[in-house]
Image: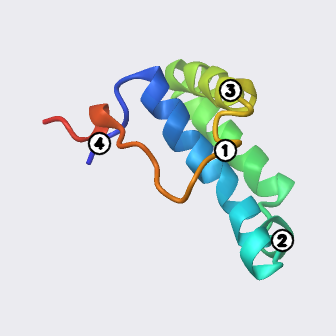
């Protein structure tokens, strides 16, 4: 396994993980975001650590993260339980 090489594949994988809390809530009536929240202190510490150690990688990561949050909002509105295979993560 490796990281997606195409933006479209990254978007698909990111959306899958973004929908996990919704699926858990739907089937188990548990709000996982409230059960195991990431504190603001932890998020800020991670952001500052990466800003200092890898500023060149942090900026594109933030842009990509924002893009995946807003792009294709209804991408899986009619999704079933099975996802398309992300081809770029399977190539050698």
Task: Report, in whole angstroms, how far the alpha carbon at label 2 lies from the one at label 1.
Answer: 22 Å
Residue on which disc 3 sits = 72
Q: Looking at the picture, does residue 71 appear above or below residue 10?
A: above
Please tell me which residue lies in front, 30 or 49: 30
Q: Earlier in the sequence, mark 2 or mark 3?
A: 2
Image coordinates of residue 48 in percent, x first then y, are 69, 38
Task: Report, in whole angstroms, how far the alpha carbon at label 1 lies from the one at label 3.
Answer: 13 Å
Q: Looking at the picture, does residue 5 appear above or below residue 90?
A: above
Residue on which disc 2 sits = 31
Query: Crowding at label 3, few (<14), some or many (≥20) Cα neighbours within 10 Å?
Result: few
> Helix or strand or loop: what does disc 4 sit on?
loop
Image coordinates of residue 8 in percent, x first then y, are 47, 24
> Helix or strand or loop: what does disc 3 sit on?
loop
Residue on which disc 1 sits = 78
Task: Report, in whole angstroms, how far the alpha carbon at label 3 lies from the one at label 4.
Answer: 23 Å
Q: Earlier in the sequence, mark 4 or mark 2?
A: 4
> Helix or strand or loop: what does disc 2 sit on?
loop
In front of the other: label 4 or label 1? 1
Q: Earlier in the sequence, mark 4 or mark 1?
A: 4
Image coordinates of residue 11 in percent, x first then y, are 54, 31
Q: Earlier in the sequence, mark 3 or mark 4?
A: 4
On screen, residue 13 versus residue 62, left or right, reads: left
The answer to whether the residues at label 4 and label 1 have Cβ atoms under 8 Å apart is no
On screen, residue 55 versus residue 69, left or right, reads: left
Answer with the quarter of the image where residue 86 lies: top left
Query: The C terminus appears in which quarter of the rendering?
Result: top left
For the image shown, how many numbered marks are present on the structure? 4
Task: Report, in whole angstroms, how far the alpha carbon at label 4 lies from the one at label 2.
Answer: 30 Å
- Specify the label residue 2 is tagged with: 4
Task: Report, in whole angstroms, how far the alpha carbon at label 4 lies from the one at label 1.
Answer: 28 Å
């Amino acid at each position: 396994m490796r990281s997606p090489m195409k933006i479209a594949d990254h978007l698909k994988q990111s959306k899958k993980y973004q929908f996990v809390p919704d699926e858990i809530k739907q089937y188990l009536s548990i709000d996982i975001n409230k059960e195991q929240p990431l504190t603001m202190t932890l998020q800020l510490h991670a952001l500052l650590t990466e800003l200092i150690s890898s500023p060149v990688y942090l900026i594109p990561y933030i842009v990509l993260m924002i893009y995946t949050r807003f792009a294709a909002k209804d991408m899986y509105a009619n999704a079933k339980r099975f996802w398309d295979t992300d081809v770029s993560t399977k190539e050698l």
